[in-house]
Amino acid sequence: MSFSFDDPAASRSASPPPSPLSSPPSLPSLSSVSSLSSLPASRSLPLAADIAAVVGRLRAAGCVFAEDEAGLLLSAARTPAELAALVERRACGHPLEHVLGWAEFCGLRVAVEPGVFVPRRRTEFLVRQAVRTRPDAEVVVDLCCGSGAVGAALAASLPGCGVELYASDIEPAAVRCALRNLPEGARVFEGDLFEPLPEVLRGRVDILAANVPYVPTGEVALLPAEAREHEPLVALDGGRDGLDVLRRVTAEAGEWLAPGGILLFETSERQTAGALSAVADGGLAPGADRCDERYATVVVGTRTTR
């Protein structure tokens, strides 16, 4: 999964609204919020005082959607002590989805854990384009799968009786999450891009979703702290111009796609021309779609040869 610095909608979002882009370096102590820190351990949640205290703490930490996040944290906490711990993690800059343990994606609740790339809501556009283009798909591969959100959404959205689903990621934590999120029968592999996939998949894949990293190396330091500090670098850094990993994918994708099969990946608007060239260089017919609502750009490569 990937993250683009120049995309205005690049911050992740659960549903309700997204996590903020960043938190200020100096945050007030949770103990200063007396109505929260003084809650007796036996008291049930939530009360109006709890909500006000949590909202105040999150707002002081720079959370843009403090009220919505407070509601999610209050719903997740079973005791006042657990609530205090959740709020402190969020106020200290941990992604909301890591704090909650899940993210919403295409109507699914996707499990995420610390150190795993958080699925972005804009990537739902990639899923929609894949389903619209190949509703008859029978074999699907989720490459650079992260939590497995894209594969899970495709499996739930394709109208057939069930797809043959494969996923791979180089990060062990991502593989663990994908195993939790993907439907029964899906096969998940740990390794670099195509390397761990079974050879029997060559020439059989109808949808190859590859949400590769595409942030230029020199811009990684400019990413929001939530991504920079809490998500794996390998899921963010796309090399000198942001397209290094993508070129590796397009160079091999044609060997794995079935005739009429499609490769889909996200990129930024400014990188679209270079991404289309990489697709063409890989022997696929290139195309691109844009969703202004999601600030999403999806490039599609189609295998037209038999």
Image (spheres, rainbow, N blue to C red):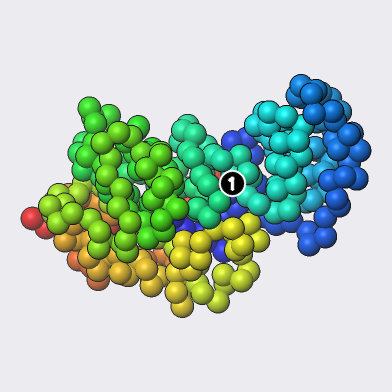
Number of numbered tags placed on the structure image: 1
Instruction: Identify the secondary structure beneath mark 1.
Output: helix
Give the residue displayed 32% in from the left and 64% down from the top: 192
Point out the residue furthest to the left here: 306
In the rendered image, the quadrant that contains the C terminus is bottom left
Residue 68 appears left or right of 214: right
> Residue 24's quadrant in the figure?
bottom right
Residue 16 appears left or right of 252: right
Give the residue displayed 65% in from the left and 61% down from the top: 225
Q: Can residue 287 be seen in this view?
A: no
Give the residue displayed 85% in from the left and 30% down from the top: 39
> Residue 210's quadrant in the figure?
bottom left
Vertical placement of 194 versus 53: above or below?
A: below
Residue with the mark numbered 1:
98
Q: Can residue 161 be seen in this view?
A: yes
Expressed as whole percent of the image width and height from the top left, the position of residue 37 reads: 86, 38
Of residue 53 and residue 251, the one placed in the foreground of this image is: 53
